[in-house]
Image (cartoon, rainbow, N blue to C red):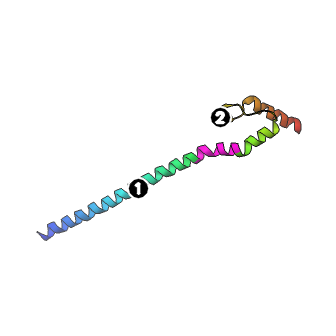
């Protein structure tokens, strides 16, 4: 085999291997990015619900005795929130 052809063939082979390695790295980074975005969105969407359940709901039930949260997903209705605001204003 001609030495020039062998050099070109080896160079092409090395470029193909490097290209394959870079494509695998790009694909891996895309998967990790997708997983990261999914985790971030789960946190963004779930954190307000968790904070409501932990901190706001006990306060609402404490200041408005005898009422239960009967809105959608257990959230207080606008009438219940208005009662809470009125009871807070009277207490000051």
Q: Indicate whether residue 46 is drawn in magenta.
A: yes
For the stretch drawn in magenta, the main secondary structure is helix
Which residue is label 2 attached to? 73
**Could you tell me which quadrant the C terminus lies in?**
top right
Estimate the spatial distance between the alpha carbons at disc 1 and disc 2, rounded to whole Å. 39 Å
Closer to us: 76 or 36 = 76
Q: Quadrant of residue 52?
A: top right
Q: Residues within 10 Å of mark 1 (few under 14, many from 20)?
A: few
Q: Which mark is residue 28?
A: 1
Q: Residues within 10 Å of mark 2 (few under 14, many from 20)?
A: few
Q: Nearer the viewer, mark 1 or mark 2?
A: 2
Residues shaded magenta: 43-53
Q: Quadrant of residue 29?
A: bottom left
Residue shown at the point (81%, 40%) measured from the top left: 62
**Could you tell me which quadrant the N terminus lies in?**
bottom left
Q: In the orientation shown, which residue stands out farthest toward the left? A: 1
Q: Are marks 1 and 2 in contact (CB under 8 Å)?
A: no
């Amino acid at each position: 085999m001609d030495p020039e052809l062998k050099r070109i063939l080896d160079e092409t082979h090395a470029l193909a291997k490097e290209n394959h390695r870079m494509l695998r790295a790009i694909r891996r980074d895309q998967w990790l990015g997708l997983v990261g975005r999914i985790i971030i969105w789960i946190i963004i969407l779930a954190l307000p619900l968790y904070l409501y359940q932990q901190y706001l709901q006990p306060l609402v039930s404490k200041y408005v005795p005898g009422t239960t949260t009967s809105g959608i997903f257990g959230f207080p209705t606008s009438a219940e929130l208005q009662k809470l605001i009125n009871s807070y204003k009277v207490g000051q």
